[in-house]
Image: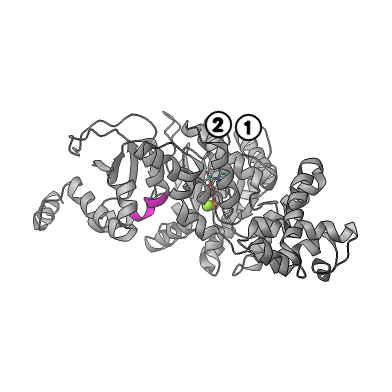
Amino acid sequence: MLVEAARESRAEPAVKTPESEWDHVVKRLREEVGDVAYRSWLAPITVHRIEGGEAVIAAPARLYRDWVATNYADRILELWRTENRQITRVSVVVAPVRASQPAVADRPAEPGPQIRLAPVEAAAIGETGEDRPRPSGLDPRFTFENFVVGKPNELAHAAARHVAEACSNPLRKVPFNPLFLYGGDGLGKTHLMHAIAWHVFKNACDRKVIYLSAEKFMHRFVRALRFKSTIDFKEEFRSVDLLMIDDVQFISGKESTQEELFHTFNALVDQNRQIVISADKSPCDLEGLEERMRSRLGWGLVADLHPTTYELRLGILQSKAEQANVHIPRKVMELLAHRITSNVRELEGALTRIIANMQLVGREITLESAQEELHDLLRLRERRVTIDEIQRRVAEHYNIRLAEMTSARRARAFARPRQGAMYLAKQLTSRSLPEIGRKFGGRDHTTVMHAVRRIQELKDTDPALAEDVELLRRMLEG
Ligand code: ADP
Ligand code: MG
């Protein structure tokens, strides 16, 4: 065997070093992500070592580590595997680089936390018991402590906590089986699942927990079929205390994987073991699922994560800025919370960019610098709200006819909503006062100006009106 291995390596055309492999990986990544992203994020990364199938790269600061981990993880692993099939995992560590220092393989890394990227195996924790190995495949930032709770996610959060606590206490029965978390992209499903795993790991490390994506579950299953090791596979998954499968929508239409998962679920439920599932839709809206699977998924507690509200986004930004130990002016946070509404991942990305810019260029964060830094992102997000849409929404909200937006009736029940609509038109569109006036039944621009001022004043003294206006603004911007 040894001889063969040696022969094989002699046949290699050129001697590969960790540095040369990383050079190739990063060169190809640069072509994909472009020069700006390369210079900002990848140029400062060096290779640290390759050991036992794991490639460790080093970032000069936590910020880079987090960014690279979040944004380039999977791709780096893929590219690396085309260079070197032995690599099954990539990790990023923080290791400050001195400008003159070449990337040598044995430079000691800062002992701080490692983030494992795209582990090939599932995150299985608590299996060995001794020495409490750190679970791999779990993001160390995804804990309950770092999860900001607000109206849109309070049910999912409470349910996740409940499960985590029950699983950490052998005397407690599983509360609901399965716990099914669903919601749009980037709203915190994976975060909550990792948080459950961390909680159980910290409080009851003898528990066997498996967390993995449905995609990985399928790959493992297919591999087990190929290598005729399905018995081991079944054994492994049916002997856990807590099984968490992320993004279960992936197995829609994949019948044999569904069947296997279905039997796994039943086996676990029979033994009173907890299951947590996430998906992008509710069980009844998931397509391509067998009926019995769908009904099994909906048996326990189904908790959804709603789109974030402005308040939640602001709370998340504050918490992230605190974690990064950076002061961000309130105006900048408000700008981000107002404008980046799609999901938390993008919100975090924007914040990271602003902080990075400040740290790289040594520039103070101001509203202007943030707008400049994020102009592409903000422009993209800028939804074109039209005056027609504003009028329609406002009329619906106050339950009046759309025609009242342009009518001459001056009763307050019509005049106030009309003024509110004018105010929103001024705030949300780039139309001039005369243009707005024309759209509201040919009114004069001074009428529009008066309406805008009036609403501004009333917002300070009339909380109900302030709330209406805020709600409408959010609906229109969303
Ligand atoms: P999903 O799995 O639903 O697509 P993730 O759990 O991966 O979303 O969340 C995306 C990012 O947003 C993660 O970095 C996560 O930490 C962050 N995030 C989402 N919701 C919250 C929250 N309520 N508090 C703090 N961070 C959050
Ligand atoms: Mg996820």
The x and y percentages for residue 443 are: 76, 66
Residue type beneath disc 2: Ala
**Image location of residue 369, percent across then percent down:** 45, 44
Q: Residue 54's mark? A: none
The residue that disc 1 covers is 169
Label 1 SS: loop
Amino acid type shown at disc 1 = Asn
Q: Which mark is residue 204?
A: 2
Tell me residue 449's x, y (percent): 72, 55
Task: Specify few, some or many for label 1: CA neighbours under 10 Å numbering under 14, 14-19, or 20 or more.
Answer: some
Contact (Cβ within 8 Å) of mark 2 with mark 1:
yes
Mark 2 and mark 1 lie on one chain; the one further toward the N terminus is: 1
- In this rendered view, identify the residue nearer to me: 112 or 342: 342
Residue 241 in view in this figure: no
The structure residue drawn at horizontal position 23% and vertical position 56%, both measured from the top left corner, is 83
Answer whether residue 8 is magenta in the image. Answer: no
Q: Magenta stretch?
A: 71-76
Q: Residue sitting at 17 percent across and 50 percent down?
A: 20
* Residue 115 position by quadrant: top left
Measured as percent of width and height from the top left, residue 475 is found at: 69, 57
